Amino acid sequence: MKKNWRFLAKAIAISVVVFAALPYIETCYQYALMYITSTQESKNLSYVSAPGLCPFFIFILATPKLSIRRRIIALLSGITIFLTLDLLMTLVWLPYFQTTRPSLRNMGSHYGWYVIAYYILPFVMWFGFAFRQIEEFFRGITAENSQ
């Protein structure tokens, strides 16, 4: 039971720091996306997924027994994956700026990416990068509860 509380306390402490830094993270992320796309219009895109990175950062940093090297690789890979997917969304969404109304395809891809980036992808990536540690953590919790 002690393990649960330690993980929860660590996740909450990291959450406070990450969410306090969220405006700076979003700004840096938008500038990186603008640099990659070479357009100022990406600053106006509403789907920029920097807030989707926050749960991923929090869980990767709070996961017990994950080596520093593995954490750094996971964080850099996560940023790269999100930026790549945002770049693809930029290619889909930029034609919208040349029309008065977005098409159903634009809107569908926007909301689809929003759901994936904010609610699904951070947890799938965390599970992918820290599978062994997560399994060991929950196996330990199950062993403690059965005793």
Image: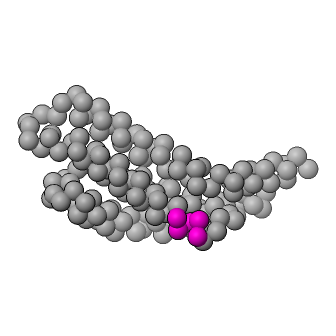
- Does the rendering let one see residue 9? no
Question: Residue 86 appears at what percent x and percent y?
Answer: 32, 50
132 left or right, relative to 83: right
Dominant SS of magenta comes to helix
- Does the rendering let one see residue 64? yes
Q: Residue furthest bottom?
A: 68
Colour scheme of the picture: one colour
101 left or right, relative to 79: left
Q: Residue at x 59, y 49 (%)?
A: 127
Quarter the N terminus occupies: bottom right
State the extent of the magenta-drawn residues as a range. 69-73
Q: Residue at x 85, y 50 (%)?
A: 143
Q: Residue 29 magenta-drawn?
A: no
Q: Residue at x 12, y 44 (%)?
A: 97
Which quarter of the figure has residue 67? Answer: bottom right
In this rendering, the count of numbered labels is 0
Image: 57 above or below 117: below
Question: Residue 2 appears at what percent x and percent y?
Answer: 77, 62
Question: Residue 62 appears at what percent x and percent y?
Answer: 61, 63
138 left or right, relative to 118: right
Q: Residue furthest top?
A: 104
Q: Residue at x 47, y 46 (%)?
A: 121
Question: Residue 63 appears at what percent x and percent y?
Answer: 63, 61
